[in-house]
Amino acid sequence: MSKFESGIKEIPYSQERVYNKLSNLSHLEGIKDKIPQDKIQDLEFDTDTISFSMSPVGKVTLNIVERDPVKCIKFGTTTSPLPFTLWIQILPVTEETSKMKITVETDLNPMMKMMVEKPLKEGLEKMASMIATIPY
C-alpha cells in the first residue's frame, strides 16, 4: 500500500465546527463555485457521497465509510479508475482553532507510484488548502 499525505493546515474554526460541516457533504454546496471548472466537472454530492469527473482520470465517486466524531472522516471509492481510501483528520489547536490533514492510501505498483506520486501530492495540497479556507 502507498500512502500520500497533505501538509497540516490550520483552520480558524473549532474542531467540532469543521467536523460537523465536512461530515455531511451536502453542507459543501456553498463552495461549489470555488472549485475550478477546468479541473473538476460534473460535481455532485449528497449527505454521504461526492462524485466528479476530472481529466485525465475520469469519473470518481467517494462515499463516507466511517465517521469518528470530531476527529476523522474516512472515504472509500465506489467508482474510480484506481481504488483508494481518503481520510480527513481534524485535531484541536485551541477551543476556536483546529488543524487538518488529508491522507490517501492506495495499492500501486512501483511504476504507477512513480507516475502518480507528484500530481497526487499536489492535488492533496490543493484540496487541503481549499478545505482550510471554507467558512465553517
Image: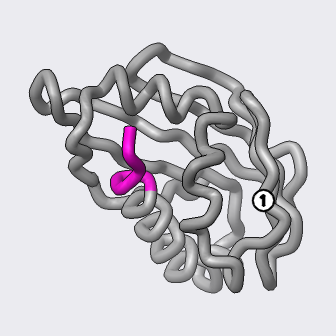
The chief SS type of the magenta part is loop
Relative height, residue 12 to residue 37 (above, below): above
* Percent x, y of residue 56: 80, 84
* Percent x, y of residue 123: 53, 72
Q: Amino acid at mark 1?
A: Leu
Magenta-drawn stretch contains 133: yes
Residue at disc 1, secondary structure: strand
Magenta-drawn stretch contains 113: no
To which residue does mark 1 refer?
43
Relative height, residue 39 to residue 129 (above, below): below
Seen at 27% across and 53% down, the residue is 9
* Percent x, y of residue 58: 87, 72
Q: How many marks?
A: 1
Question: Considering depth in this image, is 26 or 5 the residue closer to the camera?
Answer: 26
Left or right, 18 with respect to 37, comes to: left
Left or right, 95 with respect to 24, comes to: left
Question: Considering depth in this image, is 3 or 52 the residue closer to the camera?
Answer: 52
- Camera sees residue 63: yes
Left or right, 42 with respect to 13, comes to: right
- Residue furthest to the top in view is 69
Question: Considering depth in this image, is 88 or 13 the residue closer to the camera?
Answer: 13
Question: Considering depth in this image, is 3 or 92 the residue closer to the camera?
Answer: 92
Rendered image quadrant of residue 76: top right
Relative height, residue 1 to residue 119 (above, below): above
Extent of the magenta region: 131-136
Seen at 38% across and 38% down, the residue is 136
Rendered image quadrant of residue 97: top left
